[in-house]
Image (cartoon, helix red, strand yellow):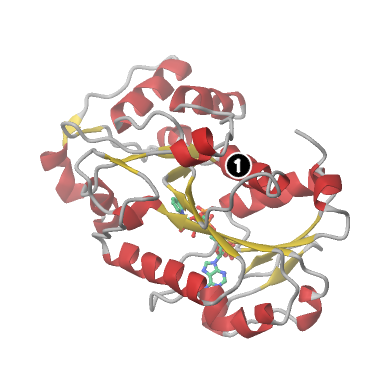
């Protein structure tokens, strides 16, 4: 990859709001390129680059944190009232800054259930779950804010430290079969790299406000689990039919099985020319396996 810091200019400063799984990967990567990146979490961390932001407990960052900020990535989901924590607490502050760009990590849940059909950015969102209605409202609020936001819709995120391997290791794995059911996924490194690619090439690429970041091969959970067991040299437990497994699943786990869609990455990978690092679950899981 080209030198990100020099392409963006050394005076750029990133704030990563919500330094969880995706946020910390992004922060780590942009720092490798020489950029300044401050991150937020809800509780104290030893990291001197981390500050506290907790919208639900009124813990708002000191104004100094925002000095010279040019880029923001928000990785924070809607709060318990369905509102966007960043817009609820920080919108006025953000409007006083000379921001070049804000990235907002959203979900492909806004597309709802397509019974296995492909969905792309030109399809009207059709949320099915309450949390997806909330998410779509947050996307709309971001657009309405007039801030320079770009929205990234993500399917299931995995990567080293958060993958089927951990579920197997922690004995949380459930091998469930449901006919014709598929899920889309994305490796955490491709979220970061796709965003960096778009920022690096922003002068030559047409701006799109909403972009899906997904890999090339939606597939069943069983294929993924089976592949993990084969890499581990173990035999996969016998699958349980969804109807029988359902009653033991938490409401949130059940809700994931209620939606079936294939998320298209054509805008990102064909129109905009991003090349995935991990085109499919096999490539991505090999990387997770090597980092176990
Ligand atoms: N996980 C998935 O498979 C998936 C799929 C599609 C979309 N998404 C969405 O993509 C985004 C990034 O996902 P992720 O899995 O990387 O997220 P994650 O690891 O769960 O991190 C979420 C971050 O948001 C912070 N946060 C939560 N509520 C907050 C509040 N009220 N005020 C301030 N900070 C708050 C958390 O703080 P702490 O660090 O203190 O906990 C954490 O840093 C999220 O919006 C997520 O919903 C996730």
Residue 97 versus residue 272 in the image, above or below: below
Q: Quadrant of residue 183?
A: top left
Please name the residue shown 25% across and 54% down the image.
255
In the rendering, at what x and y percent does residue 269 appear?
52, 34
Q: Residue furthest left?
A: 243
| Residue 43, x across and y down, in percent | 64, 70
Label 1 Cα crowd, 10 Å radius (few <14 / some 14-19 / many 20+):
many
The residue located at (23%, 51%) in the rendering is 254
Q: Which corner quadrant of the image does residue 262 belong to? A: top left
- Left/right of residue 87 with respect to residue 41 in the rendered view: left
Query: Which percent across, then down, holds residue 65?
Result: 78, 74
Q: Which residue is mark 1?
A: 194
Secondary element type, mark 1: helix
Q: Nearer the viewer, residue 199 or 242?
A: 199
Q: Percent from the top left, x then y, of residue 68?
A: 83, 71
From the image, which quarter does the N terminus lie in?
top right
Count numbered badges in the picture: 1
Which residue is pictured at 22% across the width and 46% down the height? Answer: 114
Q: Is mark 1 within 8 Å of ligand 1?
A: no
């Amino acid at each position: 990859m080209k030198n990100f810091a020099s392409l963006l200019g050394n005076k750029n400063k990133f704030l990563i709001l919500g330094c969880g799984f995706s946020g910390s990967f992004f922060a780590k990567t942009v720092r490798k390129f020489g950029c300044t990146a401050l991150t937020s979490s809800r509780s104290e961390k030893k990291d001197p680059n981390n500050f506290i932001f907790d919208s639900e407990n009124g813990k708002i960052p000191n104004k100094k944190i925002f000095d010279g900020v040019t880029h923001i990535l928000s990785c924070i989901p809607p709060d318990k009232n369905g509102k966007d924590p960043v817009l609820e607490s920080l919108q006025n502050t953000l409007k006083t800054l000379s921001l070049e760009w804000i990235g907002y990590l959203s979900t492909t849940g806004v597309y709802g259930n397509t019974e296995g059909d492909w969905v792309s950015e030109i399809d009207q969102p059709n949320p099915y779950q309450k949390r997806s209605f909330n998410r779509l409202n947050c996307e709309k609020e971001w657009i309405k804010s007039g801030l320079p936001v770009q929205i990234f819709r993500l399917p299931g995120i995995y990567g080293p430290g958060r993958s089927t391997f951990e579920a197997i290791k922690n004995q949380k794995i459930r091998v469930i079969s449901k006919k014709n059911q598929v899920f889309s996924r994305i490796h955490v490194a491709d979220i970061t790299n796709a965003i960096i690619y778009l920022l690096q090439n922003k002068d030559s690429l047409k701006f799109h406000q909403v972009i899906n970041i997904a890999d090339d091969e939606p597939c069943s959970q069983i294929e993924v689990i089976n592949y993990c067991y084969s890499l581990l040299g173990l035999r996969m437990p016998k699958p349980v039919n969804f109807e029988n497994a359902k009653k033991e699943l938490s409401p949130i786990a059940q809700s994931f099985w209620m939606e079936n869609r294939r998320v298209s990455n054509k805008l990102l990978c064909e129109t905009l020319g991003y090349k995935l690092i991990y085109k499919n679950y096999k490539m991505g899981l090999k990387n997770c396996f090597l980092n176990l």
